[in-house]
């Protein structure tokens, strides 16, 4: 009985060591990256530590035979299993998937070279005779050409309309250090854009995560915002729950050994993560995620629009901490679809205003209900108050609470 318990305990310890072998490997990866080692060095260190711990687990699982020939067979078998495991893990960690397709250049595309150091791609829809503050559309990392075509019709009402790819996304500049992404840089870029346009005040239309940027800018420069539209707004209270340097990562489809290594590096040294896996790889991963979740942007059965590549993998992981800003007397319009995957509670994160509720529209509200959406925005920009005061969710709302 004692022998059975001893063998059973040894086997349990060995299995535990085998299962936990990646942990010290990831710790070695993080430690070497933190002291400035390059990808070949920190990858080799991680794999060496993993191999050593994994072999220890194998030794614990298989008792040492008394016979000499048995010990030799055991050694050969363990080394074979070890080699196979290390080869599989090395291939999974070191083999980079194909890079994503770069976002194609769109008709009318221009670039801003901003004093912040950012180079941003944008499209302008010019009004014949500008008679109001310019409209700046803040995408949720969407379709530059499609959004420019949709919101560009507002130029017919006497306002220049600008749609741009935020830093690190689409056709805009990528940073060497991913830690440079985030709301502070995006707000600085937006203020530089306003200054570039020589506009005393601007109108903001922020969709999805673009609403977070609109809210951040409103909080920082309330006197420079004439009106603001928060369209299918992403929650502000969870804006800091993603990315680096701390906080849980958002779900990525098919998280594999290589992505675990990337996420570990982002915790300790974002520049090392980008050196290990470039922008093209992270863009491709995000594009794949967006394709898999494209249908969730619409009501069930409505289908999904094609996904434009090159959204910006590292920029999407940046932490975006933000408290609820005060409206400071700025008129606010909230637009929410009945099938939006963002929770209804997200509208309470934003300044109080008028709410336009669109039935049979999902997160991509302006794609699902373009006519009612555009009518509400036009009325709001004309000084009217469309919709109702924002309040409790209606009974027909099908999204999360």
Image (cartoon, helix red, strand yellow):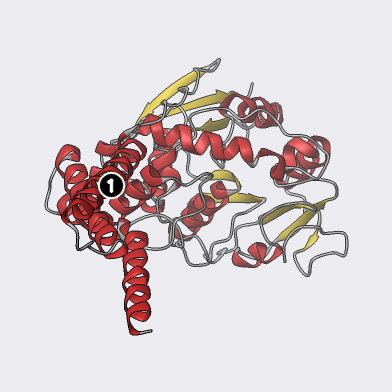
Image quadrant containing the N terminus = bottom left
> Among all residues in the image, which is located at the extreme right?
395
Q: Is residue 47 above or below residue 401?
A: above
> Among all residues in the image, which is located at the extreme top?
107
Q: Going 56% across and 28% down the picture, which residue do you hit?
A: 144
In this view, the residue in front, 263 or 211, is: 263
Q: Is residue 321 above or below residue 135?
A: below
> Dividing the picture into quarters, in which one does residue 171 lie?
top left
Element type where label 1 sits in the image: helix
Q: Going 36% across and 33% down the picture, which residue do you hit?
A: 279
Left or right for 1, reference 253: left
> Dividing the picture into quarters, in which one does residue 149 lie?
top right
Give the image location of residue 28, x and y in percent: 20, 55
Residue designated by label 1? 77
Left or right for 246, reference 177: right
In this view, the residue in front, 169 or 281, is: 281
Image quadrant containing the C terminus = bottom right
* Mark 1: few/some/many CA within 10 Å (<14, 14-19, 20+): few
> Dividing the picture into quarters, in which one does residue 370 lie?
top right
Q: Going 78% across and 51% down the picture, which residue do you hit?
A: 339
Give the image location of residue 194, x and y in percent: 44, 40
In this view, the residue in front, 131 or 57, is: 57
Left or right for 242, reference 53: right
Total marks placed: 1
Give the image location of residue 154, x and y in percent: 69, 31
Give the image location of residue 229, x and y in percent: 64, 49
């Amino acid at each position: 009985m004692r022998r059975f318990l001893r063998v059973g305990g040894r086997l349990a310890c060995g299995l535990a060591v085998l299962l936990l072998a990646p942990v010290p490997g990831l710790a070695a990866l993080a430690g070497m990256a933190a002291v400035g080692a390059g990808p070949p060095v920190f990858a080799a260190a991680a794999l060496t530590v993993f191999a050593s711990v994994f072999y220890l687990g194998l030794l614990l699982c298989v008792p040492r035979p008394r016979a000499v020939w048995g010990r030799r067979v055991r050694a050969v078998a363990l080394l074979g299993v070890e080699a196979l495991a290390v080869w599989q893990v090395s291939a999974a960690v070191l083999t980079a998937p194909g890079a994503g397709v770069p976002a194609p250049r769109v008709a009318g595309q221009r670039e801003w070279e901003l004093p912040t150091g950012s180079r941003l791609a944008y499209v302008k829809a010019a009004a014949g005779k500008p008679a109001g503050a310019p409209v700046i559309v803040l995408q949720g990392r969407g379709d530059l050409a499609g959004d420019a075509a949709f919101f560009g019709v507002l130029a017919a009402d006497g306002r220049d309309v600008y749609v741009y790819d935020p830093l690190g996304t689409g056709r805009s500049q990528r940073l060497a250090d991913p830690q440079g992404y985030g709301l502070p840089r995006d707000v600085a870029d937006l203020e530089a854009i306003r200054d570039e346009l020589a506009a005393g005040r601007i109108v903001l239309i922020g969709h999805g995560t673009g609403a977070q940027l609109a809210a951040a800018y409103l909080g920082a420069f309330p006197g420079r915002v004439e009106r603001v539209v928060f369209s299918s707004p992403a929650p502000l209270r969870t804006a800091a729950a993603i990315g680096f340097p701390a906080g849980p990562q958002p779900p990525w489809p098919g998280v594999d050994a290589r992505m675990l290594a990337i996420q570990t590096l982002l915790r300790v040294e974002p520049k090392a993560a980008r050196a290990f896996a470039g922008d093209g790889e992270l863009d491709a991963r995000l594009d794949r995620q967006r394709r898999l979740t494209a249908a969730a942007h619409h009501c069930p059965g409505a289908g999904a629009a094609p996904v434009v590549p090159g959204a910006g993998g590292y920029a999407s992981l940046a932490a975006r901490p933000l408290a609820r800003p005060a409206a400071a007397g700025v008129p606010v319009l909230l637009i929410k679809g009945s099938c939006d995957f963002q929770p209804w509670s997200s509208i309470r994160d934003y300044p109080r205003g008028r709410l336009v509720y669109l039935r049979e529209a999902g997160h991509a509200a302006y794609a699902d209900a373009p006519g009612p959406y555009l009518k509400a925005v036009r009325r709001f920009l004309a000084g009217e108050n469309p919709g109702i005061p924002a309040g409790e969710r209606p009974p027909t709302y099908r999204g999360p609470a």
